[in-house]
Amino acid sequence: MFKGCFITGIDTGIGKTLGSCVLLTALARHHAKVVGMKPIASGLIPHEGGWASEDALALRAASTLKVPPELDNPISLPDPLSPHLAAARAGRRIELPLLVERYHMLAAQADVVVVEGAGGWYVPLNERDMMSDLAAALGLPVVLVVGLRLGCLNHAMLTAEAIRAKGLTLAGWVANHVDPEMACVDENLDWLKAHLGAPLLADIPWQAQPDPACANVHLPADWV
């Protein structure tokens, strides 16, 4: 039974949060209790008299299940840096068991959990662990967000190879049109469809104001 997925991307700033919200919005049409989780967020914005992760706020807006922040965003770090550096500046250390525990607490309440990573697949969390280790600890199928821009073919293939080398399933990928001036965009899409070895789950058009509802989504039959 489908219980959720782990969202990674070919790089930082290529639309993992938007891709996560697109999937949450689509999944909410089939499941009553869907929730997004941002285990680690680095870089906070002012919010309601305090500070919050912009990514976590977006995931909450796309979720149908409301939970305490300690479940859907257990680690929030002020500085917009790689998680291991942001944690060091905050005097903290990121520990995988805490994140896994919070995920299971969240999953016990939800029908589906969409977990969004931070940065790329090999972003460091501490002196030993990387984001890929968190994905492996959760054991969820992985969805790769590909920001369509020059260089994305190489980055997408390398990341897909690394996901499979970790023993995880690449369940699908999301195309996000981040560069409205990209040349040969259809040819690049066709190449990725032919070579990534996983289905295209969503195609997100370029938007000045991103709207998850505008994506063209094709969920696998066993996700609904």
Image (cartoon, helix red, strand yellow):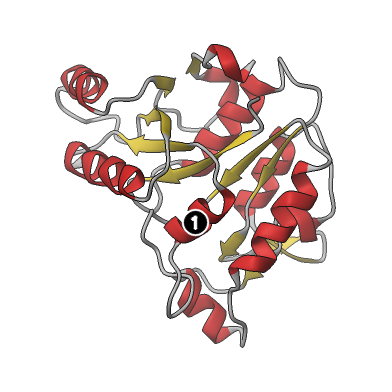
The three-letter amino acid code for the residue at tag 1 is: Ala
| Residue 34, position as x, y percentages in the image | 74, 31
Against 10, is 173 above or below? above
Q: Residue at x 59, y 67 (%)?
A: 96
- Tell whether 195 sits left or right of 30: left
Against 156, is 135 above or below? below
Q: Nearer the viewer, residue 20 or 131?
A: 131
Q: Residue at x 53, y 37 (%)?
A: 18
Q: Nearer the viewer, residue 131 or 118?
A: 131
Residue position marked by numbered label 1 in the rendering: 118
- Tell whether 10 sits left or right of 157: right
- Tell whether 197 sits left or right of 31: left
Q: Is residue 165 visible?
A: yes
* Mark 1 burial class by Cα count in 10 Å: few <14, some 14-19, many 20+: many
| Residue 166, position as x, y percentages in the image | 37, 50
Q: Is residue 75 visible?
A: no
Q: Quadrant of the C terminus?
A: top right
- Tell whether 123 sits left or right of 76: left
Q: Residue furthest front?
A: 167
Q: Residue at x 44, y 45 (%)?
A: 8
Against 28, is 75 above or below? below
Write down the quadrant of residue 17 in the picture: top right
